Amino acid sequence: MLATASPERRVERLYRSGLLNEQDAAAAVAESDRNRAQYLEQFYGVREESPTLYDIVINTDRLSVDQAVAVIVAAVGG
């Protein structure tokens, strides 16, 4: 399963959490994306992540947290 959102949405969520200012939130998202790309290439040989690599993709730009949870619960047979 892949839970995803646009970088802008992820920065906004970090900033709204009150833990980081907007600049640091943007840097944290960029660093996370770089680390994930390196991990996928090193361990799986994936040069570019694609939704087709996953059985379920949840885009939290489109779904609320409650909707995303409902999709996950339904997928696991709950």
Image (cartoon, rainbow, N blue to C red):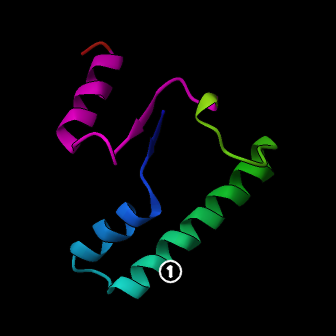
Q: Quadrant of residue 63?
A: top left
15 versus 58 height, above or below = below
Look at label 1 and name its amino acid: Ala
Image quarter hosting the C terminus: top left
Residue at the disc numbered 1: 27
Q: Position of residue 49 (x, y in %)?
A: 66, 44
Please say whether residue 19 is one of the residues in the magenta stretch.
no
Q: Is residue 61 magenta?
A: yes
Q: How many marks?
A: 1
For this view, does 6 lie left or right of residue 9? right
The kind of secondary structure element at disc 1 is: helix
Q: Residue furthest left?
A: 66
Give the residues drawn in magenta, as a range.
53-76
Name the quadrant containing residue 13.
bottom left
Asked if residue 37 lies left or right of residue 75, the reply is right
Q: Residue at x 64, y 39 (%)?
A: 50
Residue neighbourhood size for the residue with mark 1, other residues' Cα within 10 Å, grouped as few (<14), some (14–19), many (≥20): few
Residue 8 versus residue 73 in the image, above or below: below
